[in-house]
């Protein structure tokens, strides 16, 4: 059984959520009250939920996470990989919205 964190600090919340994803697919999800974020790889869904609730002052219903594996790339003849990223899709309770003009520090 996983351990839930009851309280996290505001600075920890800003460390967990790195930046919002602003692609066409993620903006289409906003009509269903879902928002996408790039988060740190070692955090869990409970920490993401409390961080979003703390930063944006909204009520979160559900958090889905997925790890995006880094693609292989060639640069100047050298082959390497992009970094792995963790993406979180956060579903808010009906009636809550996140203002897109708000920036994460």
Image (cartoon, helix red, strand yellow):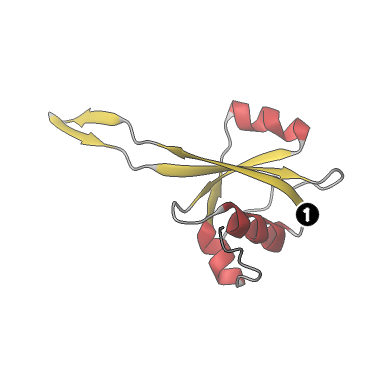
Q: Is residue 104 visible?
A: no
Q: 18 or 42: which is nearer to us?
A: 42
Q: Quadrant of the N terminus?
A: bottom right
Q: Is residue 45 left or right of residue 96?
A: left
Q: Is residue 43 left or right of residue 10?
A: left
Q: Is residue 53 left or right of residue 1?
A: right
Determine which quarter of the picture holds residue 27: top right
Q: Secondary structure at mark 1?
A: loop
Residue at 82 percent across and 48 percent down: it is 96
Count the marks: 1
What percent of the width, then of the height, locates residue 62? 70, 45
For disc 1, the marked residue is 59
What percent of the width, then of the height, locates residue 34? 70, 38
Determine which quarter of the picture holds residue 84: top left
Determine which quarter of the picture holds residue 8: bottom right
Residue at 62 percent across and 57 percent down: it is 46
User: In the orientation shown, which residue stands out farthest toward the front?
Assistant: 1
What percent of the width, then of the height, locates residue 99? 74, 48
13 lies above or below 41: below
How many neighbours does mark 1 have within 10 angstroms: few (below 14), some (14-19), or many (20 or more)?
Answer: some
User: In the orientation shown, which residue stands out farthest toward the left?
Assistant: 77
Residue at 54 percent across and 68 percent down: it is 12
27 lies above or below 44: above
What percent of the width, then of the height, locates residue 44? 54, 54
């Amino acid at each position: 059984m996983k351990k839930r964190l009851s309280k996290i600090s505001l600075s920890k919340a800003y460390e967990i959520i790195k930046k919002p994803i602003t692609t066409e697919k993620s903006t289409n999800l906003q009509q269903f009250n879902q928002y996408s974020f790039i988060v740190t790889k070692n955090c869990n869904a409970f920490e993401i939920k409390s961080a979003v609730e703390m930063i944006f002052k909204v009520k979160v219903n559900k958090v889905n996470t997925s790890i995006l594996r880094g693609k292989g790339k060639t640069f100047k003849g050298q082959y390497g990989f992009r970094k792995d990223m963790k993406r979180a899709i956060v579903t808010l309770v009906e009636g809550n919205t996140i203002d897109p003009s708000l920036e994460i520090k």
